[in-house]
Structures are given as C-alpha cells and as structure tokens.
Amino acid sequence: MEEARIKWLLRRGMKELDVMFGRYYQHRYPVAPEAERAAFRALLDGPQEPEIYAWAMGFEAPPAEFAEVILEFRNYR
C-alpha cells in the first residue's frame, strides 16, 4: 500500500481514532517491525471504527492478528 493511500485512510471519521492513527503512523510506524506494519495496513482496510475504538480503549480484546498493533496504539491515545 502506498504512502498517499495510507495517509488518506488515517482519517477515520472519529476524532479519537484520527489522533491515535496519526500519532501511531508518525511515531511508531516508521520503526515498527514489518509484521506490525502489515497488521496496521490491514487494520486500515478492515474493521470499523467502533470495533477499533473498543480494542484501543481496552473495552474488548482485539483479534490476534491486530493484538500487537493495538497494544502499540494504546501508547498513542
């Protein structure tokens, strides 16, 4: 996925997620392991905002495929 598309998909429509996605992308994504980066890209195209928010805030457990990236998201809330 090219950088321009990723930046477009960072806008989620929910202010809290916009902030988390933006901060994660700016600070963590460039240094994240490739597996985590792939999970992040899948997260951009997959689940809907209420699910991601519930995972990031710890209200629900994320699926195993997103567990690492969601754990890192919590550092950027």
Image: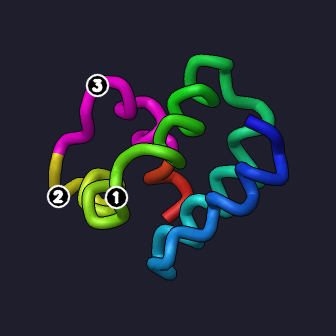
Q: Earlier in the sequence, mark 3 or mark 2?
A: 2
Work out how far the residue at label 3 is from the one at label 2, CA to CA, in angstroms: 15 Å
Nearest to the observer: residue 32 or residue 2 = 2
**Amino acid carrying mark 3 in the image:** Ala
Is 72 displayed left or right of 19 in the figure? left
Mark 3 lies on a secondary structure that is helix
* Mark 1, residue position: 48
Nearest to the observer: residue 62 or residue 77 = 62
Mark 2 lies on a secondary structure that is loop
**Amino acid carrying mark 1 in the image:** Gln
Is 72 displayed left or right of 51 in the figure? right
Residue depicted at x 77% and y 31%: 31
Work out how far the residue at label 1 is from the one at label 3, CA to CA, in angstroms: 16 Å
Badge nearest the viewer, 2 or 1: 1
Badge nearest the viewer, 1 or 3: 1
Mark 1 lies on a secondary structure that is loop
Q: What label sits on residue 69 in the rendered view?
A: none
**Callout 3 environment at 10 Å: few (<14), some (14 to 19), or many (20+)?**
few
**Callout 2 environment at 10 Å: few (<14), some (14 to 19), or many (20+)?**
few
* Mark 3, residue position: 64
Q: What label sits on residue 59 in the rendered view?
A: 2
Residue 17: percent from the left, percent from the top? Answer: 48, 68
Nearest to the observer: residue 70 or residue 41 = 41
Q: Quadrant of the N terminus?
A: top right
**Callout 1 environment at 10 Å: few (<14), some (14 to 19), or many (20+)?**
few
